[in-house]
Image: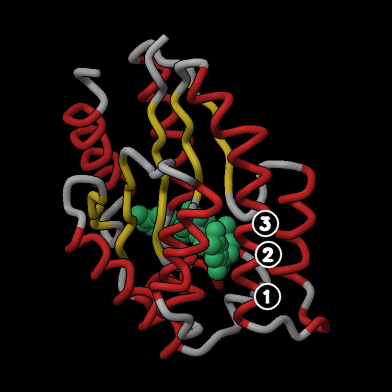
Amino acid sequence: MPRGIFITLEGGEGAGKSTNVAFVRNWLEHAGRKVVVTREPGGTELGERVRDILLHGRELHTSAESEMLLMFAARAEHIARVIRPALDAGKIVLCDRFTDATYAYQGGGRGIPAARIAAIESWVQGDLRPDLTLLFDVPVEAGRRRAGLRSEPDRFEQESDEFFARVHATYLARAAREPERMRVIDASQSLEKVEQQLGSVLQEVVGGR
Ligand code: T5A
């Protein structure tokens, strides 16, 4: 059986990833594909507990290094139990955030050198990389406003504007280096326009496979 397709959704806070997961899933299922939807940090019991620590454990004073290693610990479990088995079964895995988020948040945001992240990425993931990454791009201010309207801020959402400016710049720099894999979606537009952009990228990348 041919290997499935690994698609990730990335972007800053409130960019619209979670909102658009349903659209992408429906599009793929309409095209006759079997889809597994998952997220990071999370996706397994261990991953969801790590998520809880990282998003809500303010009293734990987690260092940047511990935060990165916890992301990768959750990811190792996620890959072994969910992502690889689904890809091996020929399914499409749709994952809300993956390692680009580690480069953007722990790298750009917290200042961990990219080479250190890359070393752990190779160790944990082997040759597994997303086939397609949909990068939801929205100005930092607008994304934070959207996220803020929705719920109480979590541990990351309490960071400064400068932190999120670095996260944003890191995502865009990665997309510029890998334009084939990372497709930038202008997420500042209306939901209808965002869906149109997603549809044309999916048609181009997944349509013929
Ligand atoms: N993290 C994660 C790391 O630091 N390192 C890592 O390695 C990984 C994997 C996870 C956190 O963990 C960090 C990054 C994150 O801070 P999360 O909840 O998964 O947290 O991610 P968030 O970005 O916080 O999720 P959000 O829900 O804030 O952002 P989304 O999913 O991009 O935004 P969404 O879809 O919820 O939309 C936000 C609001 O905007 C509206 C929606 O209706 C919603 O109310 N909206 C729009 N409004 C108008 N026009 C549009 N086009 C709209 N699109 C959405």
**Image position, residue 56 (x, y; %):** 75, 71
Does the numbered disc 2 mark a residue whose Cβ is under 8 Å from ligand 1? Answer: no
**124 vs 155, nearest the viewer:** 124
- Residues marked 2 and 1 touching at CB (< 8 Å): yes
Q: Amino acid at mark 2?
A: Leu
Disc 2 designates what residue?
Answer: 70
Disc 1 designates what residue?
Answer: 66
Where's the N terminus, which quadrant? top left
Q: Quadrant of residue 68?
A: bottom right
Which residue is found at the position 25% from the left and 68% from the top? 172
Q: CA distance from mark 1 to mark 3?
A: 10 Å
- Residues marked 2 and 3 touching at CB (< 8 Å): yes
Q: Amino acid at mark 3?
A: Ala
**Image position, residue 82 (x, y; %):** 62, 32
Mark 3 element type = helix
Mark 1 element type = helix
Mark on residue 73? 3
Does the numbered disc 3 mark a residue whose Cβ is under 8 Å from ligand 1? Answer: no
